[in-house]
Amino acid sequence: MSTQAGILKVIHAVADIPNDPAPDESLFDSGTLDSFTLPDLVTGLEKEFDVKIPDADLVPERFDTVTKIEAYLDSRKS
Amino acid sequence: MSYLRAFGHYLPPLSVSNAALEARTGRDAASIEKTSGILERRYAAADVSVADLGLAAANICLENANLTANDIGLVLLSSGSAERAFPGPASVLAAKLGLTATPAIDIPVASAGSLIGLAFAADLAPRYGNILVVASEIMSRRISDADPDTAILFGDGAGACIVSPDTATPEKGLLRIADTALFTDGNYADALQLQHGGSIQMKGLDVIIQASRKIPRSIEDLLTKNKLKPADVGVFLMHQANVNLIRKVATALQVPADRFFSNISHYGNTSSASLLIASSEWRAANPNPPIAPIVFAAFGAGFNWGAILALPA
């Protein structure tokens, strides 16, 4: 499964949305994520990608789009 | 070893509904309830001070403990809404209690202040004897209607608790303080703040995200250290910041949400007072001796956060 597919899987698990968000669509502006679903998204990403996301990295801007999430996960892998 | 001996609380009589706040701030009343779980909050009258609210809670607490002010060896007063930079309301409260030489110390950190006060009292009670921990807040004077996201949340009130050393009384107390864990990360000092002369400024997203992770982790670590699991806990008494946050912490700990005592619908977020108001109301509703561990937890400006484990005495 590609990184983007894994991200979308987690997004659908934490947010009740019918379609995939576009890669550069703001997940907060669209209402897909809010302050209470972002922690669930982060926990889901940690499990899906077997990475540890430190609290200091929990900046909303970092998780605002699928593209940004993918870039962040890539930086964690490297 | 120290004990939680008694609680008390006081809320000013004026109730402010979501409809009243809608008229002031433009925020839809139904959305206030949905996003925060708050139906109403109390506001103090203009001539009431933080120390006045604290005094009312302290007197009820002393009565519940069968003590008088002269039995108190130290006063700790938590408030993030004090009227002036110094002296804080602790000394004024002590004077109102008739105490003229008893140390009275302020803890001006807002939301987590009462948890910090209880944790400090647990360590200081063997030296000072009975410690009166009071948290009193008049947050209604620290909000701006121009910032509805924040203005809708806060209310006024005061709570109190007496922490006693095991030598102070043959009947000890209702709960033994078994362990405490306090944390601070000043990298988030600007995320929730009150400047002198200003109103509360809160980056709600940062606060919720960090609280959602840090509160359950601090509770779980404290329980694990004491060979307990969340399911072993009889009741969680938590800072009443937002009903959705309380539910999220319950989910993270994999315990039913009703294991968390909640009164936020009636009082809103009373900052540091909320933990002691909730504790006092829980105690009043459960007068029998506790039979299971109890966890206190709070999170707030600083960020400061932590948890306290109390066991049946």
Image (cartoon, coloured by chain):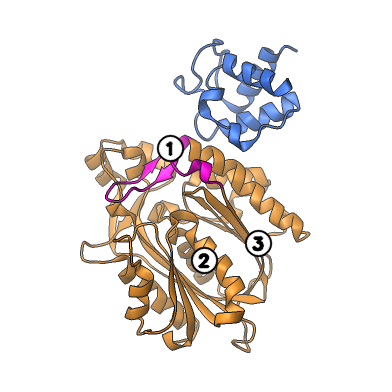
Chain colours: A blue, B orange
Region in magenta = B185-205
Q: Are marks 3 and 1 on the same chain?
A: yes
Q: Is residue B33 one of those drawn in magenta?
A: no
Query: SS at mark 3?
Result: loop
Residue marked by disc 3? B234
Q: Outermost residue, front direction?
A: B86
The percent coordinates of residue A37 (x first, y second) are 55, 32
Q: For marks 3 and 2, give the one nearer the viewer.
A: 2
Picture residue at 59% right of the left edge, 35% below the top:
A56
**B83 relative to B124 in the view: left or right:** left
The percent coordinates of residue B299 (x first, y second) are 52, 51
Label 1 sits on what residue type? Lys
The disc, 3 or 1, on the residue closer to the chain's N-terminal end is 1
Q: Which chain is mark 3 on?
A: B
Label 3 sits on what residue type? Gly
Total numbered circles: 3
The disc, 3 or 2, on the residue closer to the chain's N-terminal end is 2
Residue marked by disc 2? B117
The percent coordinates of residue A15 (x first, y second) are 57, 25
Q: Which chain is mark 2 on?
A: B
Report crowding for label 1: few under 14, some 14 to 19, many 20 or more residues within 10 A (C-alpha): some
Residue marked by disc 1? B203
